[in-house]
Image: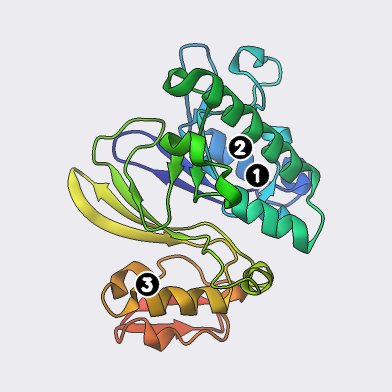
Amino acid sequence: MTLVCLDNGQNLLIDINIRADADDENHEMPNVAEDMRGRLKRDNAGRLYVDGLLLSHPHSDHITGLRNHFHLGPPKDWKEKDDKILIREMWSSPVVFRRADAAEPLGDDAKAWAKEARRRVALFRENGSSTGEGDRILIMGEDIDGKTDDILDIVIKLNETLNACNRLADGAFEARLLAPLPPEDENDEETLRHNQSSVILRFSLRGGGISDRCRYLTGGDAEVEIWKRLWKSHGKANSDWLIPTARIDDSWLGFPLGVLSDSLCARLDSRRVCDGGCD
């Protein structure tokens, strides 16, 4: 769960993991929801909001707390007494959802996300680009069998870049879609499913008005085979695309990080990556 605060004032949330213990004021678990809410703004209707919410994949540790803390459904149905957070624009991948659902049953929060995504896609099919904040969605990657061919205006294709969140494009960021990857042959879908297929985006962020001030790579729980394929496709020509700037989780263990950059060293005991001088 990462809140990216862009220098144009927008907030992009990547994944959600707000466990029930965090909502208990008597529990020692940090109240991440309260912390996040304190960083968000309210719109003219008094609603807290995020400009965008990217779901990398629908495992419970990446979407827990959606129904409890975020408004789902038409924005007009938002209730002041519930004071849930409005998602102005969803970033979602039907390919990732299908692979996850085939591996294990989706949880209730994941099902709620999928339902809301379907609602927003249906609205776009009906109204096109006139959809308003709280009804918008971007699709990360084309779906199979031409399912997204009629909504390509909201589809980000593999290896394409996007530079707008909630339709504001002012140079605050650029993000290149690196995954989910398509299968290499008819038997490859199983491999991708068992390697925790996730949305992978490589961000270039503006800071203080300076373009490309920092870079951020988010990859959900994508496992070793997926990263190897990305390195094979992009690594030699674009090694900076694949340098992780966030915490390494279990999916990285065993991956040959040295192949990414000579300047990288991995602290697998603490699961951190730093550039150069690890002691």
Residue drawn at the location 61% of the way across and 45% of the way down: 32
Say if mark 3 contacts mark 2, CB within 8 Å.
no
Q: How far apart are marks 3 and 2 (CA)?
A: 31 Å
Name the residue carrying label 1.
Answer: 31
Residue 272, compared with residue 137, is above or below; it is below
Name the residue carrying label 2.
Answer: 34
Say if mark 1 contacts mark 2, CB within 8 Å.
yes
Q: Where is residue 95 in the image (x, y as percent from the top left)?
A: 61, 53
Q: Where is residue 229 in the image (x, y as percent from the top left)?
A: 47, 76
Name the secondary structure under disc 2: helix
The answer to whether residue 215 is left or right of residue 42 is left
Q: Is residue 120 visible?
A: yes
Q: Where is residue 115 in the image (x, y as percent from the top left)?
A: 71, 34
Tell me the mark number nearer the camera, choosing from 3 and 2: 3
Q: Which of marks 3 and 2 is nearer the N terminus?
A: 2
Name the secondary structure under disc 1: loop
Name the residue carrying label 3.
Answer: 243
Q: What is the count of numbered marks? A: 3
Crowding at label 1, few (<14), some or many (≥20) Cα neighbours within 10 Å?
Answer: some
Quadrant location of residue 189?
A: bottom right
Q: Where is residue 48 in the image (x, y as percent from the top left)?
A: 54, 25
The answer to whether residue 37 is left or right of residue 215 is right
Residue drawn at the location 64% of the way across and 67% of the way down: 196
Q: Which of marks 3 and 1 is nearer the N terminus?
A: 1
The answer to whether residue 2 is left or right of residue 192 is left
The amino acid type found where label 2 is placed reads Glu
Residue drawn at the location 47% of the way across and 87% of the way down: 256
The amino acid type found where label 1 is placed reads Asn
The amino acid type found where label 3 is placed reads Ile
Residue 62, compared with residue 67, is above or below; it is below
Quadrant location of residue 213?
A: bottom left
Residue 159, compared with residue 145, is above or below; it is below
